[in-house]
Image: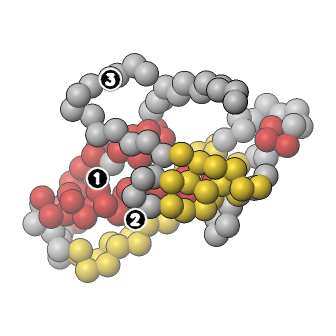
Amino acid sequence: MSGEDTTLSRYTLEGTRESPKRMTVDTGEATFEIGHDVNPVEYLLGSVAGCLNSTATMVARDMDIRIEELTVTVEGGVNYDSYMGTETDDRPGLQGLEVTLEIDADASDDELSAWLEAVKARCPVTDNVENETGIDVTLESG
C-alpha cells in the first residue's frame, strides 16, 4: 500500500461472513457484528459521528472550551440500484453527507467557529470521506 510510514498508527481488522447480511468483525481488541444492530452504511455514518465526537472533544480541550452537551447528526442517501444489479447512473455509495453538530459549551460564537474549523481540519474519518483514499482489494482463494 502506498503511503507506508513508520509514524502511522496501523489498524487491521478481520471480518468473517456469518450470513449474506451479517459479518463478525474482530479488531484484536473488540468484536462486533455488522448487520445485527445496524447495516454497513449505518456503521460508516456512525464512524463519522464517533470520530467527530472524539475530535471535537480533543479540540475543545486544546482550546479550553468546556462542552456541556454535544449531539452529532449525520445524514446521507444511497441509491441501492447498483448494489442490487440494476442499471443506474448513480454511484453505489453515499451520494453525500450532511453533518450537524449541536453544542452547548462555555464559548463565544467566534470561539465556536474556530473550534468547528479545527474539528473539520483534524478529524481522520471525515478526511477519509472527503478525500480520495486509495484502496487495494485483492483475492485469496483457499
- The answer to whether residue 71 is left or right of residue 83 is left
Closer to viewer: mark 1 or mark 3 = 3
Asked if the residues shown at circle 3 and circle 2 are in contact, with their CB atoms under 8 angstroms apart, the answer is no
Picture residue at 40% right of the left edge, 19% below the top: 2
The residue that label 3 is drawn on is: 4
Q: Tell me the SS state at disc 1.
A: helix
The residue that label 1 is drawn on is: 119
Residue 112 place in picture, x, y as percent: 23, 62
Question: Can residue 31 be spotted in the picture?
Answer: yes
Mark 2: give few (<14), some (14-19) or many (20+) Cα within 10 Å. some
Residue kind at label 2, given as amino acid type: Leu
Picture residue at 64% right of the left edge, 65% below the top: 38
Q: Tell me the SS state at disc 2.
A: strand
Q: Does residue 34 lie above or below 97 as drawn?
A: below
Residue 6: name its quadrant.
top left
Residue kind at label 1, given as amino acid type: Val
Asked if the residues shown at circle 1 and circle 2 are in contact, with their CB atoms under 8 angstroms apart, the answer is yes
Quadrant in which the C terminus is drawn: top right
Mark 1 to mark 2 CA distance (whole Å): 11 Å
- The answer to whether residue 88 is left or right of residue 39 is right
Residue kind at label 3, given as amino acid type: Glu
Closer to viewer: mark 3 or mark 2 = 3
Picture residue at 79% right of the left edge, 31% below the top: 89
Q: Does residue 19 lie above or below 90 as drawn?
A: below
Q: Nearer the viewer, residue 94 or 98?
A: 94
Mark 3: give few (<14), some (14-19) or many (20+) Cα within 10 Å. few
Q: Earlier in the sequence, mark 1 or mark 2?
A: 2
Residue 67 place in picture, x, y as percent: 23, 74
Q: Does residue 14 lie above or below 135 as drawn?
A: below
